[in-house]
Amino acid sequence: MLRTDLQSAAIPTPVKRIALIIAGLLGGWLLLDLVATLGTDVLWFQNLGYLPVFLFRIKVQVGLWAIAFASTTFFILGNLNLAKRLQNPEIVPASGFPRGLSARKREEPTLFLSLNWQWFLPISLVLSFGMGLVVLHYAQTAFQYWQSGQGTWRIFFNSPNPSLRLPSLTGAIWKTVLALPNDPWLVGGLLGFAILGMTLPRVWLPVSALLMSVSFSLIGSGYWLRLLQFFHPIAFNSPDPILKQDISFYIFSLPIWQLLEFWLIGVSVYSLSAVLLSYLVSGNSLSQGRFLGFSRSQFCHVSGLSGVVMLAVALNYWLKRYDLLYANHRVVYGANYIDTTVRLPVYTSLSLLALAIALVLLWQTLNRRQKQRIRSRFSLSPTGLIFVLGLYWAIAALAGWGLPMLMQRLIVQPNELTLETPYIRNNIALTRSAFDLETINVEPFDPSGDLTYADLLKNDLTIRNIRLWDTRPLLQTNRQLQQIRPYYKFPGADIDRYTLKSDQEKSSPSEIHISTSLNNPLKPKIPDEKRQVLIAARELDYEAVPQQAQTWVNQHLIYTHGYGFTLSPVNTVGPGGLPDYFVKDIGSTNGTTSLTVADERIRASIPIGKPRIYYGELTNNYIMTGTKVRELDYPSGDDNVYNSYDGQGGVAIGPLWRRWLLAQALKDWQMVVTRNFTPQTRLLFRRNIQQRIQAIAPCLQYDHDPYLVVANPENSTSVDQNYLYWIVDAYTVSQYYPYSDPGSEQFNYIRNSVKVVIDAYNGSVDFYVADPSDPL
């Protein structure tokens, strides 16, 4: 008989050789890029002193990636290989069984569920189309779950987006189906997938299976932090009000169980669909337009996969019980009356029923060789299997959707306030607990207006620091008076308090206190005075450099850093209504600093030194220091002052192999051919402080507004010591705190448990625990 199977066509040898050469080159390039990316990160983390942390994270991520990829590939390809061995190469109706089968297979010629073309073709097309939806869902989830980064392999080592929860397979497929009429490209892609699945199953099914494996391995490796939390939970000692589970179960364990359910549903549904399609289009079914039925071995295989699907369904409904505590209802966030009285018992029953069906189906598969016992004892024939599964889904639809809606209309709506009040209390109590708002005390405030002179004396420090300036007008003024050059920027200003040494003999003539305006001269009688001030960093924004000057040398060797800051009190005004600067300008050479200082009291109180800013909010480009080219330090009149970096930041470029490695990682081959490097040249990258700390500790959420501080480190006597530091508030967050309403946020638990300090000159990063009581 003439074969019509398209996948049997031989591929010419020259085409194979070209394909192998292309695959080899692509694989070599990817391997080189991987080595460069990892090697660069190792050098960067080693310079900061966080190499053990990085290596441990990579070890866990790679391990999870390998486990997820191997388990998914083994399960899907194992079933496809079994289907390939069991499928019929050629169906001959007259003989009653496939031609060319072994004697063992000839013993069971019985065929189940034969289909003519009216059913065979639509079912095959639906199965193939559904597989495309499943693959698309997992690929989209992997893409959305990971943040993009520099380099081909950076996606493997970045932090996943913690605000995303794994979506439901049925919900995602339904949304995709609804979007099909408005997206012809999506329709064409899915139809192409379906046609390839039907015509080239031996080639296309394994390829799509590998895509499934890669997608899930990316998602699984992103769970490295949650996996570590799963194995090292810390009790909250506070149970939820419905299921009586400790909060730690929801924070540390539930995400991993949901990941397992997400994997099990995906691989089981895809494998069942792929195996059914493989059996349906095997042999010459497509050419004859007819499927004569499943053999007993094939049916046992399908029955076993159906059992795995029902096992996944049982786990899904069991975990839905916990998801009720995150339901967002119109009246209450979390489980409401219908959830606890209807959905909770329904989900429990559906889970146990699905588990029972799964065990029966798996028992049939494990005992498939005992043919007589199967004939006499096994109750689920092919028709019975279809009936049982259809009945189960009908019950699930009625009990899980119809019954709650009916109860809501007949019972809850007429008595909504009475029935929902206990659940509203749960919502309020656990939301306050999750956001650490339990210590709020409500006190009445009576603005009587009987302010006395004694009250002023009692609150002297507060009166002397009443704010006249806000950050917005100060920044506008700074941008007009203190930017000096177009490429200098003030990205923000922050309020802080500094202790100024007292000067009883001479006070600044511009210090106009509120107390003075009240004719109550409250001259400070203490040695030191704490003043509230506004501080703003003068950073270098390379994007503002004139376009004609944006050369490679300027970008990476000359325009390397910002310089200085402004410091002004919030409660005084200078001449003409301008800020009364304690520290301002740039390019002055009075004393030991290049910034203008108001007086000796400020000079003695505020350490300045060499205020160069190599790491900040606008430092987005990488630079090379210690080269033959001098760096622009700051403008001084019509001239420029130049300097060479002597800090501890950056990675030493060193020998030629390391230069090639860094050039490959940054995709900057000018680094290889330039002659401006010296043995002391260092590469400073990830200079943006947000990117810097995110790379070190991706498990934390960071405040988007870092603030600059001027501080004198302990035991420091060097005049060249850097005194500028960035401080960032870091938060532990979760979206798994039960009953806690996230509002417009993507988390419903937060603690400001960590403070991060970044050296603006050397780039060192230190993390400090601010709240040891936080379980996260």
Image (cartoon, grey):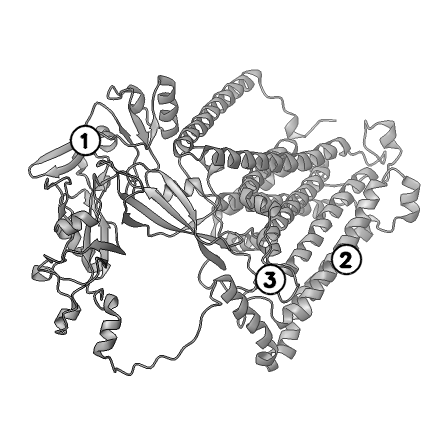
- Looking at marks 2 and 3 on the same chain, the residue that comes earlier in the sequence is marked by 3
Instruction: Identify the amino acid type marked 1.
Output: Asn
Q: Nearer the viewer, mark 2 or mark 3?
A: 3
44 relative to 776 in the view: left or right: left
- Looking at marks 2 and 1 on the same chain, the residue that comes earlier in the sequence is marked by 2
Residue 122 in the image: above or below residue 641: below
Q: Residue 94 at x, y = what percent? A: 84, 35
Q: Residue 334 at x, y = what percent? A: 57, 66
Check disc 2 and report the residue beneath it. Answer: 353
Residue 636 in the image: above or below residue 493: above
Q: Secondary structure at mark 1?
A: strand
Looking at the image, which residue is at 59% across and 63% down? 325
One can see residue 293 in this view: no
- Looking at marks 3 and 1 on the same chain, the residue that comes earlier in the sequence is marked by 3
Looking at the image, which residue is at 93% across and 41% down? 372
Instruction: Identify the amino acid type marked 2.
Output: Leu
Which sits in the foreground, 665 or 176? Answer: 665
Which sits in the foreground, 519 or 129? Answer: 519
Q: Residues within 10 Å of mark 3 (few under 14, many from 20)?
A: few
299 relative to 320 in the view: left or right: right
Q: Which circle marks residue 238 in the picture?
A: 3
Placement of the N terminus among the 4 image quadrants: top right
Instruction: Identify the amino acid type marked 3.
Output: Ser
Check disc 1 and report the residue beneath it. Answer: 643
Q: Secondary structure at mark 3?
A: loop
